[in-house]
Image (cartoon, coloured by chain):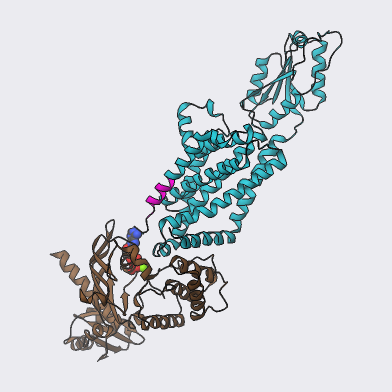
Amino acid sequence: MTNDVEIAIRARNLSKTFGRLRAVADVDLTVARGQVYGFLGPNGSGKSTTIRMLCGLLTPSDGDIQVLGLRIPEQAEKLRQHIGYMTQHFSLFTDLTLWENLQFLAAVQNLSRRQASLRVKELLQEYGFAGRASQLAGTLSGGQKQRLALAGSIVHKPDLLFLDEPTSAVDPESRRDFWEKLFELADAGTTILVSSHYMDEAERCHRLAILDRGHLVADGTPADLTGALRGRTLEVSAERPRQAKQLLMQVSGVISAAQIGNSLRVLCDEVGDCAGRIERAFAAAGMSAEVSATTPSLEDVFVAATNEHKAVELRGESE
Amino acid sequence: MNWRRLWAVVIKELRQLRRDHITLLMIVGMPILQLVLFGYAINLNPRHLPAAIADQALTSGSRQVVMDMLATGVIEPVKDAESPQQLMSMLRRGEISVGVVIPWDFERRRALGESSVQVLVDGSDTVVQNAALQLAQMPLTYTPGSPRDSSIPLPELPISVVAFYNPQRVSAITIVPGLIGIILTMTMMMFTAVAIVRERERGNMELLIATPVSKGELMLGKLLPYGAIGLIQTSLILLSGVLLFQVPIRGSLLDVYLSALLLIFANLSLGLLISTATQSQFQAIQMTFFVFVPSILLSGFVFPFEGMPEPAQWIAELLPLTHFIRLIRGIMLRGAELVELWQDWVALLVFIVLMMVLAVSRFRKSLD
Ligand SMILES: Nc1ncnc2c1ncn2[C@@H]1O[C@H](COP(=O)(O)OP(=O)(O)O)[C@@H](O)[C@H]1O
Ligand SMILES: [Mg+2]
């Protein structure tokens, strides 16, 4: 196949069941080389499980995986030296120093002694740990730990990098720095698959997939995904937002209404006369409201996708 | 097997160990503490042990013997007794620790040079037993009026000691070699039993299995540093045993270390197997006790192997400590050579290979 060169990850019908729980269900996924690919989903939606299957750490219950042209999990051992994996929870050794941690990882990643000491020195410098080489990893702050873990996952300059919620316990500034580093790596040609539950991070990805309770409910570029919702998002300004919200949820066609300051952000199920119905409902209730169109965000995409998926499931159950 | 990666794992383990002060203290402190506790408990010189004396002879000679015994201050009469049967039931009830029997034919026995006084001791208490031996070495004073045939030699020990409950007469000399085994069994198995589980609990394992490091490198990388520590512990016990208690090493020192090394790796590999079969450090420690307690009881360290019922002997044959105790007592106390005791070191070798194969095949580089 010719396009295999450009494809980093291809998964078909990927499923994983734990006992009776379907943690991942029929996920199809294609990640092109050089992309920063985002996995967006709430806790328990199957992000970690999917990543672990793609790395060959968990055996899928069903489905086929090809990563960098290798069949997974059969050829997982061959894949290891080409990938970097940053686990969701800090997994470097807290009782080793930064230098010792990186030296260890360099050695198990088959770097020679010379290469290892050069690379470790370079990484300590680049990731802002100059002069702290002999500090114990356990004494780092949350953001520093994540930076060290990232450095650790790329000692061997992998072609493909898996990052599982790398910024979930990190302050906003450290998050920005962290993404800075990710784009540097991407520019250098590394394919990156990163999971997150932050919308603003998802927006930075070249492409993203939205997971909900094990199902892939949407995927595409952020622009495509938000573009598909054009015309379905409204902003409603009302005097008493809390009552207004209750009223809105009763209007047919309204999927969600979220209060943002003094106004409400409304997502409708289709492009149409949603705005008209809302205005009539407010008038009937004797409340004044201003309804205007607004540009869709990824948050809206997320709400819409999970909602539609829920509807499909409900229909499936009732049949 | 990639030597660079293996070495990296070994160094990593040593560095982690260096920062674990409690474990370090255990490694050095425990052997010495145990040895001192066991050893000195045995060597204590007790005084005023509760005793009863059944003097059935009631001659002036026998009274003299009783006086001499009391004069040592080791025993102190607390009860009256007339027969050995009475003494034995007092012993059993714990009312006395030492019973002395002077038989009615005391004078005749003494004249014939037979052992003429019997000391019954509670052998379950090594302190008491030791004291009784001391009594036994007391020379019997010659009393005029009871002529003695000089052609008959005096018995080496004129007083015979019968130890109940501990017929083996465990002493520092027999304890120290066994103690090497006990300490190695306890610490070595524990180290590796928690080693892999701990990395799983801390999440390190997920990082490790995503790298090219192999199962064999991970496992051997844990065995080697702890093996070295086992040898250090062995040296500590040997050294303090020799310095404090003059324990002899009659065989070759190399054989002693080779035997220790076999026991060390047997326990480390068993620990690894436990590590692959348990989910938490707590479970792993429970499992080590599951092996440790029978090891102490059945290995011949406490009770003589020959006296155990057959099923217990079969179980004992499966325990590494049993074979080690035979090896080490043979080498240190009887001056045997390792090659002569081939059955036991072959058994240990087979055990090690079996455990390693099982541990490596059970360990999966996956999270399933
Ligand atoms: N080893 C496991 N055994 C049983 N259930 C699991 C296991 N790992 C994950 N799960 C379950 O699978 C679901 C998906 O988990 P996960 O992939 O960790 O989600 P996420 O990373 O998106 O938060 C959750 O309901 C979780 O409880
Ligand atoms: Mg997760």
Front in this rendered view, residue A155 or B7: B7
Q: Is residue A267 left or right of residue B162?
A: left
Quadrant in the picture for the C terminus of chain B: bottom left
B37, above or below A219, in the image? above
What x and y, as percent, mark residue B315? 46, 34
What x and y, as percent, mark residue A140? 53, 73
> Residue A200, located in which quarter of the rendered image?
bottom left
Magenta span: chief secondary structure: helix
> Residue A285, located in which quarter of the rendered image?
bottom left
What x and y, as percent, mark residue A151? 45, 74
Q: Colour of chain B?
A: cyan
Q: Which one of the lettered chains is coloured brown?
A: A
Residue A122 at least partly seen: yes
What x and y, as percent, mark residue B305? 54, 29
The boundaries of the magenta stretch are B355-365
A22, above or below B361, in the image? below
Based on the picture, tell me whether residue B106 belongs to the magenta stretch.
no
Residue B299 at least partly seen: no
A36, above or below B1, in the image? below
Q: Is residue A266 left or right of residue B127?
A: left
Front in this rendered view, residue A130 or A262: A130
- Total numbered labels placed on residues in the image: 0
B81, above or below A239, in the image? above
Q: Residue at x 52, y 49 (%)?
A: B190
Q: Residue at x 66, y 39 (%)?
A: B38
Quadrant in the picture for the N terminus of chain B: bottom left
Q: Is residue A154 left or right of residue A51?
A: right
